[in-house]
Image: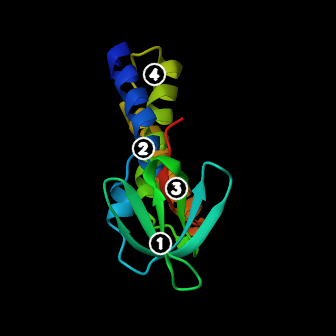
Amino acid sequence: MKFRKSTIVFVLGMLATATLEAGVIPGRWEKVEGLQEGTRIVVEIKSGDRLEGAFKRVSPQELTVIDSGGSDRQVPKTAVAKIVTAEKVKDGLTNGMLIGMGVGTGVAVGAVALATGGVSEECIVCGLAIFVGFAGGWGMGAAIDAIHQGPEVLYQAPK
């Protein structure tokens, strides 16, 4: 089995982009726009204030939240630093399994390439090592996602 440098670079690039899936893209409002009316959110304002309430709507210029007194509160989008869900959200297992599989496989491929100098006559051992990395990463990713529970970040202002 011969590994080329381009294969290793490709695998490392895939690992780097796989970890981005878990976070929110700064400045993007898609997650907020997809909320159902009445979803409890916490809005952190750039001034340091916090507004907790029920999501009502988002327009091109502002976010509207119903506060605890039942009043509509409009916040200009430019003033919003961060928006998270008010209640804890249990993370699904899929993204953790996929990221874990990618990382585990990438580490195993890299280790096999380093151990064999890029060429190996022992393909069974190499295949087994890659499978162990794949399965181990899958299991670790699933376990980490199973215990992760917290507010979901819906929006983060660009820095």
Instruction: Please state which of residues 107 and 34 is positioned toward the viewer in this rendering.
Output: 34
Q: Give how far across and how far down residue 143 sits, in percent.
A: 57, 63
What's under tag 3, amino acid-wise?
Answer: Gly
How far apart marks 3 and 2 lie (CA) works out to 28 Å
Say which quarter of the image contains residue 45.
bottom right
* Kind of element beneath mark 1: strand
- Find disc 2 in the rendering and name its residue: 27
Mark 1 and mark 2 lie on one chain; the one further toward the N terminus is: 2
Q: Position of residue 21 (x, y in %)?
A: 41, 47
> What separation in Å lies between label 3 and label 1 (alpha carbons)?
35 Å
Residue at x 57%, y 76% (from the top left corner): 87
Disc assigned to residue 95: none
Q: Which residue occupies 41% across, 16% down?
A: 118
Dot label at residue 141:
3
Disc 2 is placed on an element classified as loop
Residue drawn at the location 47% of the way across and 46% of the way down? 78
| Distance between the alpha carbons at the discs numbered 1 and 4 | 54 Å
Measured Cα–Cα span from mark 4 to mark 3: 24 Å
